[in-house]
Amino acid sequence: MSTPLLDVRGLRKRFGGVMASDGIDLQVIEGEVHALIGPNGAGKTTLLAQLAGQLRADAGSIVFAGSDVTRLSPHARARQGLARSFQITRLFRSFDVLGHVELAVQAVARHARAGSPSPARDRGSVQAQAREVLAEIGLEARAAASIDSLSHGEQRALEVGLALASRPRLVLLDEPMAGMGLDESRRMEAIIERLRARTTVLLIEHDVDAVFRLADRVSVLVSGSIIASGPPDSVRQDSTVIEAYLGDE
């Protein structure tokens, strides 16, 4: 296997009497779509929060692009190229779609300049980059739309776009198809398929059929532990995975 872009070793996180991450080992190779699946309560979102820096791990290490980022802040990890998508409701409903992405692009530029404001002459560059992101997520025609006017699927697509604004090497997507109908899910699949040409993706998703269509490799998390990891066909046929998770699907 190639040197991993993301190399997680022995990650542990406890909440009271619950071990949410129980010695997790996970490797993500640059250029792949890597899916993380498992039952509700398995610890998937907790793992993503540790990878992005929102939660501090109790033990273990997170190495990204050859650097140990285990103790770095979310902003420091983002500057190194590790981004996570968030719910659109965290942002400003008075902004239109393009304005949200421009804001995300400017935030990255400010951090890159150690806190200096973006000069006015960069406005055209910021808008051009924001429009590139909207084209990638299929929302170029909705640039002037308000957040409240977007469908659920369009909001989730914008959520992905905001993570892409930093031009990350690895983007963490937490259930991007949650709550979607068939047509919206297929559109999100198409977005994720396009992403593989520009970035590595670690995807949490409950739509197992979509996972096995999209992923290059799949890891299965159950009760805070990875019980299997490998190509989709191999994982689908793993008897331990079938008994612990896929059998119920």
Image (cartoon, rainbow, N blue to C red):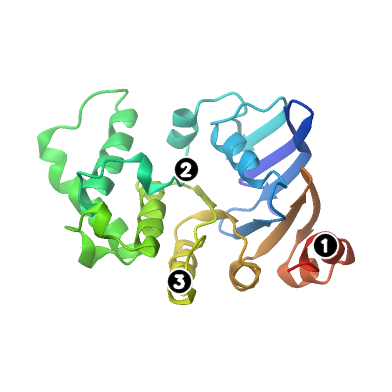
Residue drawn at x 62%, y 61% is 206
Q: Residue under circle 1?
A: 241
CA distance for labels 3 and 1 = 27 Å
Q: Which structural element holds mark 2?
A: strand
Mark with earlier residue (3, 2):
2
Amino acid at dot 1 = Val
**Dot 1: what SS?**
helix
* Residue 111 found in image quarter: top left
Is residue 234 positioned above or below 17 on the image? below
- Marks 2 and 1, the one that precedes in the sequence: 2
Q: Position of residue 86 (x, y in %)?
A: 44, 45
- Please tell me how crowded label 2 is: few (under 14), some (14-19), or many (20+) other residues with Cα within 10 Å: many
Q: Residue at x 64, y 35 (%)?
A: 63
Position of residue 94 measured from the top left corner of the image (x, y, whole percent): 20, 44
> Which mark is nearer the camera, 2 or 1?
1
Q: Which residue is mark 3?
A: 190
Residue linked to disc 2: 83
* x and y percentages locating residue 120 in the rendered image: 10, 35
Q: Depth check: give the residue in front, 17 or 132.
A: 17
Instruction: Name which quarter of the figure residue 157 lies in.
Output: bottom left
Percent x, y for residue 178? 52, 60
Foreground label between 3 and 1:
1
Mark 3 surroundings within 10 Å by alpha-carbon count, few (fewer than 14), some (14 through 19), many (20 or more):
some
**Please, what is the three-letter code of the amino acid marked with disc 3?**
Ala
Looking at the figure, which quarter contains the N terminus?
A: bottom right
